[in-house]
Amino acid sequence: FFFAFVSSDMRLRYTTLAVVAALLGAASADRPAPRSALQQRRRLDGLNAPQPVNEGRAAVRRLQGGAGSPKLLRQLKIPLAFTCWYLFSIVYSIANKQVLSAWNFPCTSAAAQLAVGALSVLLLWTPLPLGGEKRLRLRSPPSLDANDVRKLVPVASCLAAGHLLSTVAPAYGTVAFTNVVKTLEPLFTCAFSALLLGQTFPLPVYLSLLPVVFGVCLASASEVSFSAVSLTSGLLSNVAFALRAIAAKSVMSGGAIGSNLTSQNLYGVLTLMALLGCLPVAALVEGPRIAAGTAATVEKMGRRTFARQLLLLGTSHYFYNECAFLALSSVHPVTHAVANTVKRVAVILI
């Protein structure tokens, strides 16, 4: 009864406040655990131990932020990754709804986005001729064997399932409602971190998620264009993406896999693998209707406009996820999920 009298502005304000509360509470997830007395003693002994002159000078340069200091690069990498993640995500959310409004084939659209992303990463890995025998490679490709690929199958499966479901959700509901539902991702990440990794967090982290849960219930109960398909797809995509984040974090921190498998290359490989999983689903669900539906959309929009929209959609999707993986490599999955929630508030506002 109370939900029916809450305006959309109040829902938006409440969702924003809930996300801020979640961000403040989940910040303690990345807080390092206190050192024991023995660990502190060992650390002090290591600091007091004599060091060679060259190593001592290198340490001074690192502390001063001079050349060769990885600290400055780390400090710039995280904010840049989050900024690009947010910007590309906003572009993707707007382009995704525009494409689905004219070409309502969410499964095929999801596969097309991954296909554009796969083409993008292959171009980055391909050496470009500069004249003569000179070649320019924008990014060095990774090297993986069959065992390495098998380790990545669970992550790619979660990526494919989450991407399909998150594309279906806005096709049956509004962008704002879909993003409100997907703010529950930190809740699933906390639950799976406890169940699969045995990691628990301080009580404020869990209490900070309650306003987010209440805000989603509030928005769902008072949503004019409520869709059970959109709600279910959004919730299931939260499950898939929470499992993907935990599995990907385990891969990135669990030792070397192949060679040159950086965070960006990891997402490139996962994109190629997820595309192989999405294509059969798209053909099975929407295959009989895709030819006629695409012809009608091209006739209405024009071939160039339709192709340009798909290119923008796939490119923005790939690079926002690549930036998200770069951010995930630097923070805990719970913090990453909360940052994803804050990003969705920006999408709702825009």
Image (spheres, rainbow, N blue to C red):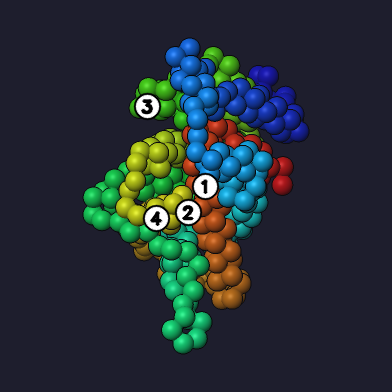
Residue that label 4 marks:
260
Element under disc 1: helix
Instruction: Give the spatial CA distance, label 2 vs label 4.
Output: 10 Å
Identify the amino acid type marked 4.
Answer: Asn
Q: Secondary structure at mark 4?
A: loop
The answer to whether marks 2 and 4 mark residues whose Cβ atoms lie closer than 8 Å is no
Residue located at (58% from left, 50% from top) = 68
Three-letter code, disc 1: Leu
Q: Is residue 137 visible to us here?
A: yes
Foreground pick, 64 / 84: 64
Q: Are marks 2 and 3 in contact (CB under 8 Å)?
A: no
Mark 2 and mark 1: span between their CA atoms?
A: 6 Å
Above/below status of 286 relative to 90 = below
Residue that appears at 53% across and 24% down: 48
C-alpha separation, residue under disc 4 versus residue under disc 3: 26 Å
**Residue at 58% across / 64% down in the picture?**
312
| Residue 146 as seen in the image, left or right of residue 222 | left
Q: Earlier in the sequence, mark 2 or mark 3?
A: 3
21 on left or right of 142: right
Q: Earlier in the sequence, mark 2 or mark 1?
A: 2
Label placed on residue 159 = none
Amino acid type of disc 3? Leu
Name which of mark 4 and mark 3 comes first in the sequence: 3
Q: Which mark is residue 326?
A: 1
Return the residue at label 3: 197
**Disc 1 or 4, which lies upstream in sequence?**
4
* Mark positioned earlier in the residue sequence (3 or 1): 3
Query: Residue 279: where, in percent of width, then height?
Result: 36, 59
Which quadrant would residue 276 be assigned to in this image?
bottom left
Give the residue at the far bottom of this rendering. 132
